[in-house]
Amino acid sequence: ENQACHIAVSTLSSVSLAGEVARLAPKDLCIVGKTETENIGIDKIVKNTITNPSIHILIVAGKDPEGHRSGATLLSLCESGADKSMRVIGSPGRRPVLKNVTREEVEAFRNQVEVVDMIGCQDAKDVAGKVKSFAKKIHLSCGKKKFARVVKPLNIAPIEVIQAEEIAKVELDKAGYFVILPMRGKGIISVEHYTNDNRLLRVVEGQDAGSLLMLISVASERQRLAV
């Protein structure tokens, strides 16, 4: 992250694209990362943006995740904001409800940044080129309101942070334990389910954390009932 720069990039569900853009390090790139969900993911984008008033451009690129549609949700948020229940107006996502930001924070985000639609683009060089293009516009138009907004940072309410302490006695779950193994070569996550005496019961594989969570929950409950 470079807080002296003005452009952020979200690569949505294209994780490798974020790394490729970061390696190219185009001028004025402040931060690049993924945004896979239409609720918590958007919450984090809003928070990270409004706490860094130097960011004025947010480029949205990469694959828009099916169902979640975090990219389309970002565009909708920029265009129409959120309703009284903090649901993003016009979002096609499944659950585009923002529970970790306020209406004031959403409006500060909308006022601070211009969201640039590059959804579907997975070419790092094209994304880097767009960053460079906007960098030139920002610096050439420093006297214009569009790119030279004076943004007053909001005071974000602190979240309680609890420090972990050494546990004197560990109570093991009767269902056993899991070992999580990211397998980048295959593009999947592998989860090994063991009994508490270290016997491998099953291996669960998937491409995303959400589907794995559902399968693991079912497997754990079956094992718990069998014990």
Image (cartoon, rainbow, N blue to C red):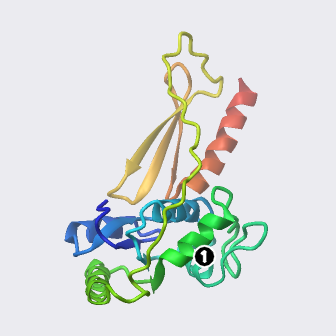
Give the residue drawn at x 63%, y 72%: 67
Above or below residue 17? Residue 203 is above
Residue 117 location, x and y as percent? 47, 85
Q: In terms of secondary structure, where does tag 1 sit?
A: helix
Q: Quadrant of the N terminus?
A: bottom left
Residue 186 location, x and y as percent? 37, 59
Kind of residue sitting beneath label 1? Thr
Give the residue drawn at x 66%, y 61%: 102
Of residues 102 and 226, the one nearer the viewer is 102
Left or right: where 111 falls relative to 15: right
Of residues 199 and 90, the one nearer the viewer is 90
Determine which quarter of the picture holds residue 37. bottom right
* Residue 107 makes an appearance in the image: yes
Of residues 49 and 144, the one nearer the viewer is 144
Above or below residue 197? Residue 25 is below
Q: Report the residue marked by disc 1.
A: 73
Outermost residue toward the right in this view: 84
Counting other residues with Cα less than 10 Å from the Cα at mark 1, is it few (<14), some (14-19), or many (20 or more)? many
Above or below residue 89? Residue 159 is above
Above or below residue 197? Residue 90 is below
Give the residue drawn at x 23%, y 75%: 26
Left or right: where 114 falls relative to 139: right
Q: Quadrant of the C terminus?
A: top right
Residue 156 location, x and y as percent? 56, 53
Residue 84 location, x and y as percent? 78, 69
* Residue 65 makes an appearance in the image: no
Give the residue drawn at x 54%, y 77%: 111
